[in-house]
Image: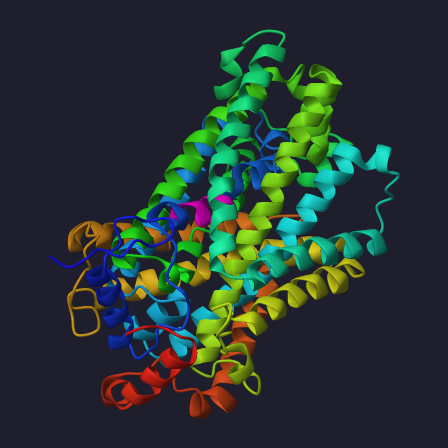
Amino acid sequence: MAERKRTAGDSGYSEDDRHQDTQVLHGMGYAQELERRMSKFSNFAISFSIICILSGGINSLGQATAGAGGAAIGIGWPVGVLISGVFALGLAQISSAYPTAGGLYHWGSILGNRFTGWLSAWLNLLGLVTVLGAINVGTYYFVFGAFGDRLGLEDDTTTRVVFMALITGAQALINHFGIGLTARLTDISGYLIFATAIALTIVCLVAADGLEISRLWTFNDYTGSSEGASLVWPNSVGIGMAFLLGLLLPVYTITGYDASAHTSEETVKAAHNVPSGMVSSVFWSGLAGWIMLCAFVLMIPDMDAAAAQGFNVFFWAMDEQVGTVVRDVLYALIFVCQFLCGLATVTSVSRMLFAFSRDDGIPGVSKVLAKVSPKRRTPIASIWTAAVLAVLFVWFTSAITIAGTPAYSIVVSCTVIFLFLSFTLPIALGLVAIGGEKWPHMGPWNMGIGAYKVVAVLAVLAMALLLFIGVQPPNNYALPITVGFIVLALVIWVLFERRRFQGPPTGDIIEAREGAIRAAEEAVGEKG
């Protein structure tokens, strides 16, 4: 019986398992340059950390409370989680068959063609870079709301960008030192998010004046009703539309699970553990987030007053109901969770940038971005490029307004559309390709062809719904920006990239790469 090699975070990872993971990667034409050290839990934890119910669930809470009120949480949150879960199931099934870094890019290419892969890559990259910016700006506003007065902070562009640069730089530095350190911290983040969510739930229930459970299924139309609420939803739209707008809270929050796919080449038993990480991160985030936010709604002293607070609802309710010491301890824990959320996002976007560059997807700089440090076994240039781009995004958009709406807010709305379009494209292509020459085998994580087709159809319908909701005022500029980007992408493809970009290796090209694969692995010290 072969001696089993113990690997960080997974004592059951054997030499045979390692060899099998490497052979799958070789079969797709790539070398094992990144270090495969992430366990099943680590793969789950990185997606769970990016989802981070203590980041989006708190910072975007006004999307629900200033929309349909308590029912937006009690009923709307589970509905939104189911929508995100549909996408996670579709991506999980594909990831089991094709476990590579930058998964969405490869799936778009393999299940479609060079253009669909190229478009998937750019949609996902733009979404991930702006999501990184949005997460860390959300952390800035959380710190500002929690400690701003005591720290003497004033909300202006300079303070915001300096904070953004410092926090993103720290996250990039941790990633720079290797996946081992990053995985350990995101593992801790997984436990810490659970523990903090439980603590916040208990505090809310204890601090509540009374447990008025009916709030959780009581509908109100708060859109456009007061100064604070109108900053979230400026027009009064009726209860039905208010409920749909409130779905953006769970949908904004429950995303980022593609991180499990982006770290496929660093995950042991990837064909099994990556899809499991995606689906389980959505399930546990959805459940824990629902319980936590329901407890928060029950703590709110007055729902009408809460709606009037707009995006400030979390701090207002905590100030009203919770003592200073307990509140500050919770704020400190939430800040750490939000920092680790950004850390995991740097990992995700850098691996996507690395994978796309490996196939010369970024003209002029691909060789630099695809280089892996032999010492750290990380794509250092891609890590720092992702961090710099996120900071620049916040800097440029903070200083621009379009018809009175900050460009930053408009672009963040586009971000969600871009991300979910990048999810939908390979899932829809898989609906046609599954069982055929392009996708002959399902992978060991298998829901069945019939079930996948149902999921794929639901994902396409869900994308149409999200597009409709996501372009409502004040985000009505998101639609022309999204359409404009797709038109620009088509023009660039036809004029330039169609002839230059070759996409992932296929057929004889894979066989011709054997020598290059061996040399690349020897260069980073990977043992065959």
476 lies left or right of 29: right
Label the magenta part by its dominant secondary structure.
helix
- Give the position of the N terminus as an image quadrant: bottom left
Residue at image position (30%, 53%) is 6
426 left or right, relative to 252: left
Q: Is residue 45 magenta?
A: yes
- Write the residue at 40% across / 42% down: 282
Q: Position of residue 505 (x, y in %)?
A: 32, 83
- The answer to whether 302 appears left or right of 351 in the picture is right
Where is residue 421 shown, x and y percent of the image? Answer: 45, 61
In the foreground, 466 or 345: 345
Q: Which of these two is toward me, 274 or 302?
A: 274
Between 167 and 362, the one nearer to me in the picture: 167
Where is 129 relative to 11, above or below?
Answer: below
Q: Position of residue 301 (x, y in %)?
A: 67, 14
**Residue at the spot x=61%, y=29% of the render?**
65
Tally of marks: 0
Looking at the picture, the colour scheme in use is: rainbow
Name above or below for residue 369 compared with residue 478. below
Asked if one can make out residue 128 in the rendered structure from this viewpoint, the answer is yes
| Residue 102 pos. (x, y %) | 42, 67
Asked if one can make out residue 457 in the rendered structure from this viewpoint, the answer is no
Q: Is residue 136 found inside the magenta-colored segment of the image?
A: no
Q: Quadrant of the C terminus?
A: bottom left
**Farthest residue, direction top:** 210
- Location of residue 424 by image quarter: bottom left
Q: As displayed, is residue 499 above or below residue 191?
A: below
In magenta, the rendered stretch is 44-49
Q: Residue 316 falls in which quadrant of the image? A: top right
Position above or below: 49 against 168? above
